Amino acid sequence: MLELKNVSFDAEGGKEILEHVSLVIEDRFVAVTGPNGGGKSTLAKLIAGIYRPKEGQILLDGEDITELSVSERAKKGISYAFQQPVRFKGLRVRDLLNLAAGDSTSLSDCCQILSEVGLCARDYLDRELNDSLSGGEMKRIEIATVLARKSKFNVFDEPEAGIDLWSFQNLIRVFEKMYGQTKGSILIISHQERILNIADKIIYLKNGRVENYGSREEILPNLLEGTQAAGTCGVLTGKLED
Amino acid sequence: MDSIQRSLLKEVAELDALPVGAYNIRANGVSAARNTTANIDIVTKTDKPGIDIIIKPGTKKESVHIPVVLSEAGLKESVFNDFYIGEGADVVIIAGCGIHNCGGEDSEHDGIHSFHVGKNAHVRYVEKHYGEGEGRGKRLMNPTTEVYLEEGASMEMEATQISGIDDTLRKTTAVLEAGASLVIHEKVMTTGTQNAVSQFTADLNGEGSSCNLVSRTVAKDQSTQHFISVLNGNAPCAGHSECDSIIMDQAKVLASPQLSASCTDASLIHEAAIGKIAGEQLIKLMTLGLSESEAEEQIVNGFLR
């Protein structure tokens, strides 16, 4: 269970990005959605420890982790998938998966994890994480590193952003499968209806505040209605069409 | 050989025992072991220190190991090794030099290697330089590599200098005839107040010749590096050089690429990049549970792989 108590965060220059956000996340699959600039990615980075809040507390299973570093939080069981996966000259897919899973990962474990995200281990294990990989491939490898960690709290920041339609269809299937398998919690930032459709709960974040937080059944119909009312470029369709 | 020499040998040539095939092991200025084969002869030079390595035309799947170890402080030597690789041969040559200096005087090994690669022959050349020892004396190495590639000949060279060499001037020159190809991967890391200069010149003289030079370096602490590459396209040819450096602490890195073409069908490219480890790379590895210093180590090791 992850709890945010009255968390606020200012960007450099003092602009308020998150204002007094309080949330308890204990369901298996929680989606965060809302307009661009609403503070979703900031929320994810605050949970991972990449940003530190101006005020408030973050608790993991009741333990205050507000002051813990990125590494310490990772060790406590928080995983974070970057919106824009990082490329490394020289490091290979195999290296990253080994680092993610700890030294004990066997080759067959690596293969299994890659196949879960729809990549063939034989083709990818020895590939360098450099510019030769496409955006879609990088996204799936990024997700694989999170899967390899088997953490209790997993954060995915817009896994669908910036990838082609074909990769997107595959990605959705990955998350649909992940939903069935996860033992911990998944917090996923997304604009996609198909992702929101498998969420137990949805957080609607706007202008740095939680405007709505509830079960999918409560939140989704309102969001879809809003999308239709707003015309072509709504919250749910926005990102893919960008 | 003593245990220090054996450990140096393992470091530079990955040898626990005498290798299979031809070899010449030089320890503290003298030949410690030698073996020749039916196709590979090794002959001691009579006019200067060094050996001639003569590989018969058509020799396939054979290797030559010529490691050098220095464990005596204050020893300085220049060694001339000339390789003659016969037409159509395909061989692997493993060289390397390890210096252990625990004394107050400088130790120095200057290896001058020339490769005469015959028509359509292929050579893979692996060279590793390594230094260790707590003495105040410096560990110095100045390797010179001269490559002559005849028509259709090819050479892949992997040069590694990861630790322990205080000062180095690495000089590589190459002349390529028609259809010849040369690929060089150089990896250098400097720490402390070490200084490394790498000077590379290739003359692409023959039609269809190609050269690809990839240099990856890491400069830490107060160390300094200078990378100089000169590609001369004198015929329809393809040349590419790439130097990529990670700079850390108070290190200094200078890259001086130079391209020159005297033929309209010469295609030459240079890429150079110097930069620190990206913050997001560190953060990514930290989200996997690594500390900042562990993340840095992984990134550097991967970069220099």
Image (spheres, coloured by chain):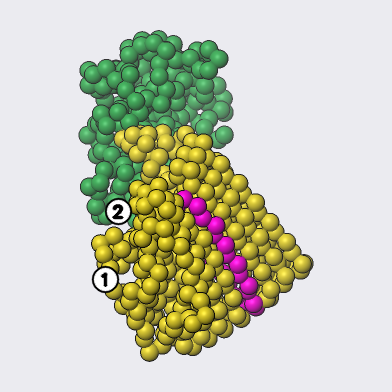
Chain colours: A green, B yellow
Q: Secondary structure at mark 1?
A: loop
Question: Could one spot residue B57 in this view of the protein?
Answer: yes
Q: Which residue is found at the position 66% from the left and 69% from the top? A: B203
Q: Horizontal and vertical percent for residue B257?
A: 65, 54
Q: Horizontal and vertical percent for residue A165?
A: 49, 44
Q: Which mark is residue A111?
A: 2
| Relative to A238, residue A7 above or below | above
| Main SS, magenta residues | strand
Which one is in front in this view, the residue at disc 1 or the one at disc 2?
Answer: 1
Task: Write down the chain letter for disc 2.
Answer: A
Q: Which mark is residue B35?
A: none
Question: Could one spot residue A220 in this view of the protein?
Answer: no
Q: Which residues are magenta?
A: B162-183
Foreground pick, A182 / B195 = B195
| Relative to B255, residue A78 above or below | above
Label 2: how many residues lie within 10 Å, few (<14), some (14-19) or many (20+)? Answer: some
Looking at numbered disc 1 in the image, what kind of residue is underneath it? Ala
Looking at numbered disc 2 in the image, what kind of residue is underneath it? Cys
Specify whether A150 is left or right of A189: left
Residue that numbered label 1 is attached to: B17
Q: Horizontal and vertical percent for residue A38?
A: 49, 19
Q: Horizontal and vertical percent for residue B248?
A: 49, 39
